[in-house]
């Protein structure tokens, strides 16, 4: 973090974001292996209204 001038809080947020992306990718890989046609989910964005869930492809 010191090399990139990030605070500890910023570093933690980045790690959590990348970890979430990794787990979503693993779910998709396994779903494809099991011949699923569709996966539905929802994701909350900071830009959305408080608690509002948005469907994503």
Image (cartoon, rainbow, N blue to C red):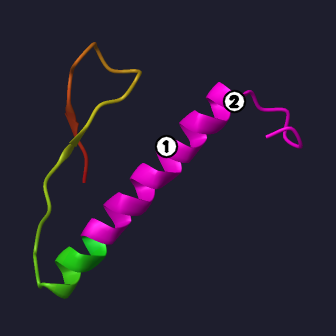
Label drawn at residue 42? none
Q: Quadrant of the N terminus?
A: top right
Q: Using residue 28 as the reference point, say whether residue 11 is left or right of it.
A: right
Residue 8 got which mark? 2
Q: Secondary structure at mark 2?
A: helix
Whether the magenta-drawn stretch holds residue 20 is answered as: yes
Query: Is residue 8 found inside the magenta-colored segment of the image?
Result: yes
Position in image of residue 50 (x %, y %)? 27, 13
Of 19 and 21, the residue lying toward us:
19
Task: Specify start and end residues of the magenta stretch as a single range.
Answer: 1-27
Magenta span: predominant SS is helix
Q: Residue at x 10, y 75 (%)?
A: 37
Determine which quarter of the picture holds residue 11: top right
SS under mark 1: helix
Vertical order, 27 against 40 (above or below): below
Left or right: where does residue 43 sit relative to residue 2?
Answer: left
Q: Residue furthest right?
A: 3
Q: Which residue is mark 1?
A: 16
Residue at horizontal 86 percent and vertical 38 percent from the top = 2
Residue 8 drawn above or below residue 49: below
Q: Quarter of the image containing the C terminus?
A: bottom left
Is residue 26 placed above or below 16 in the rendered structure?
A: below
Q: What residue is drawn where x is 33% and y is 70%?
A: 26
Relative image position of residue 40 (x, y in whole percent) = 13, 54
Callouts 2 and 1 close, C-beta under 8 Å = no
Q: CA distance from mark 2 to mark 1?
A: 12 Å
Please provide percent x and percent y for residue 9.
63, 26
């Amino acid at each position: 973090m010191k090399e990139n001038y990030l605070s500890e809080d910023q570093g933690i947020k980045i790690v959590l974001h990348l970890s979430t992306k990794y787990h979503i990718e693993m779910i998709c890989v396994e779903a494809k292996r099991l011949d699923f046609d569709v996966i539905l989910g929802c994701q909350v964005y900071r830009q959305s209204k408080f608690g509002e869930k948005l469907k994503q492809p």
